Amino acid sequence: MATNTYEHNEAFFQALIEHSTNALVLLQPDGCITYASPATEGYTGYTCKELVERNSFTLIHPLDLAMVQSALATVLAIPDRTETIEYRFLCKDGDHGWFRGTFTNMLTRPPVCAILSTLYDISEQKRTEERLRRNKESSQTLLAREQAVLRQEEVARRHLNDLFMQAPAMVCVLRGPEHRLELVNDAFRQLYPRREFVLEKTVRENWPDLEDQDFFEELDRVYQSGRAYAANEKLALIDREDSGIRDEGYFNIVYQPIFDERGSVESIIVYIMEVTEQVLARQRIQESEARLRRLIDANIVGVTFCTLEGRINEANDVFLRMIGYTREDLRAGRIDWARMTPPEYEEIDAQAISDLRARGAIPHPYEKAYRRKDGTLLPVVVTAAALDEANPNECIAFILDNSMQKELDQRKDDFISMTSHELKTPVTSIKGLTQVLLKRFEQRDEPDIKRMLLIMDVQLNKLTKLIGDLLDISKAQGGQLIMEQKPFDLDTLVCETIEHMQTTMATQHIKLVGKANATIMGDRDRIGQVIVNLLSNAIKYSSRNSPIVVKVFREGQQAVTQIQDFGIGIDAGYQDKLFNQFYRVTDPREPYPGLGIGLYLSRQIIERHSGRIWLQSRKGEGSIFAFSLPVV
Ligand code: ADP
């Protein structure tokens, strides 16, 4: 056996070890180095001398020490046992080198009597491993990262897609210089419910209805310049139904270029919002505002924007001219319609204000007056409407200068007054002469002359009454209608008046019902005049043999007289105007004589007695005219 052959050849083994490229170290169980072969220096940098008697544990990397000690413990427990481990060892150059080391328990084998440790430098292998590990690790993380990025991109893409598809705005994506359709969302499809958009086809093929407009050119410009572009309220003629008929629409459009990684435009996202409704509504408002402005500026009537309290915020030139104030006064807030109004019109203004609050408008224009800046009075006709029904405090008022009308009225009144005065004297004298002639012919046998004189007398009575009424009108207007203040019994007056009327009229029967048992304080003749007026109308406006019913009764402190006929009646639309001066309901098919004075005078008289006059009537069914007077 070879062992036997070399058994005693110590020098041989010595030479073998000394020249071996393997590093051999002998250790004691406590780690103390007792021998290091020359090759050890090549591995560790330490000379044999430097190593012997050093504790190897001090040179082991602290992280590997426990492992080394555990391997030693294992080999110490069993003679001849070998353990192989990889660990780091502090070399002389200050770096830790990687070694694969074996520990063999040769303590029981003289002359070794130590732990034999071989060292094999595996630093390079470790470095390679480390590199590989790192490479692997980094390629794994790279892969993971790439996958994560891809996932994120996918999520973002889907998100974007959903966003586009469900966006309330119309969105389409157009790719390349020909703007080929890449994506079009639902909102866009709703604009063209019948159109089949074809992806990959150009914008010109998909939207032929836009051909002669400048949309494609705008897209070209954005594509070429790379600059986003927005168009507001752009008018487009579009064939929504694909029927060949284009209608107008207004759109807010944004063209947003998308760039590729080289920075060139790849596609364009187009966002569109239809704003047709808003634009048309605004146009309508602008048109109506312009129309109103033209009306105001036309200076036909006075126009003001004012509050119900009196402040005038705006007024046109006509109004300012009417009231003699300047625009400067207006700006300085010196014009206040309430302060310009004389006290006698406060009541009628209060009524107008309450109408404005309740209904947002005044039902009829009404007459009033303003005191001009110079103190003179200006008669006007006013009407107004709330600007905003929800807030009736601000209104627009139209004011007509009524002074011309008032002047004409005055001239008419003067004329009536003058002519009635002028007529009164000759008519009175003709009437007196007629009476004389009647007396003279009373005993004579001249029936024709007597008949003619009687007709003259009747006609003269009518004329006298007419002149009396006209004079009364003038007096009423001047506030000179004088009323006596004496107590009288209403029932007697009514009874007497009916009897008198009945004697002059044989065909129609006047029936009296009830009693008022009331003493009235006032002018008996004037109240008698009212009853005559109402009875005459009842007779005049009903057929020859229909009855007339007069009813007198008490209602608390009021005595009511009612005159009812079953004649032609009055349409509801005219009823509130009947008591106005000279107002007549004229129906050309029913010519009734009259001037529209009787009811006007009747109202004046009744109101002067603190009473009230009214009517109930239905066209074709007859009327009830009634008045009430306070009982003494
Ligand atoms: P006049 O009878 O002279 O025209 P009034 O002032 O008495 O004037 O009456 C005004 C108008 O009212 C009349 O023209 C007539 O149209 C209407 N009217 C008055 N009384 C009656 C009535 N009893 N029935 C129908 N219409 C009447």
Image (spheres, rainbow, N blue to C red):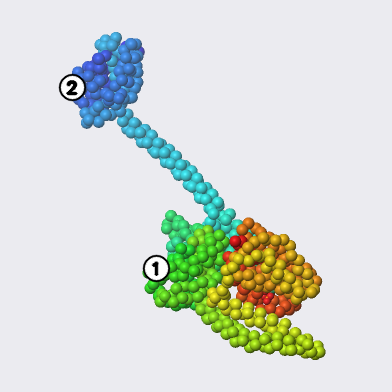
For marks 1 and 2 on the same chain, the one whose residue lies earlier in the sequence? 2
Quadrant where ligand 1 appears: bottom right
Q: Secondary structure at mark 1?
A: loop
Residue kind at label 2, given as amino acid type: Lys
The quadrant in which the C terminus is found is bottom right
Residue highlighted by disc 2? 49
Please state if 603 lies on the left or on the right of 252 as rendered.
right
**Residue found at x 39% / y 72%:** 329
Mark 1 in CB contact with mark 2 (< 8 angstroms): no
Query: Where's residue 17, x and y in %?
Result: 26, 20
Q: Residue furthest left?
A: 49
Residue highlighted by disc 1? 333
Residue kind at label 1, given as amino acid type: Gly
* Residue 179 in view of the camera: no
Above/below status of 103 relative to 431: above
Cα–Cα gap, marks 1 and 2: 117 Å
**Residue found at x 26% / y 11%:** 113
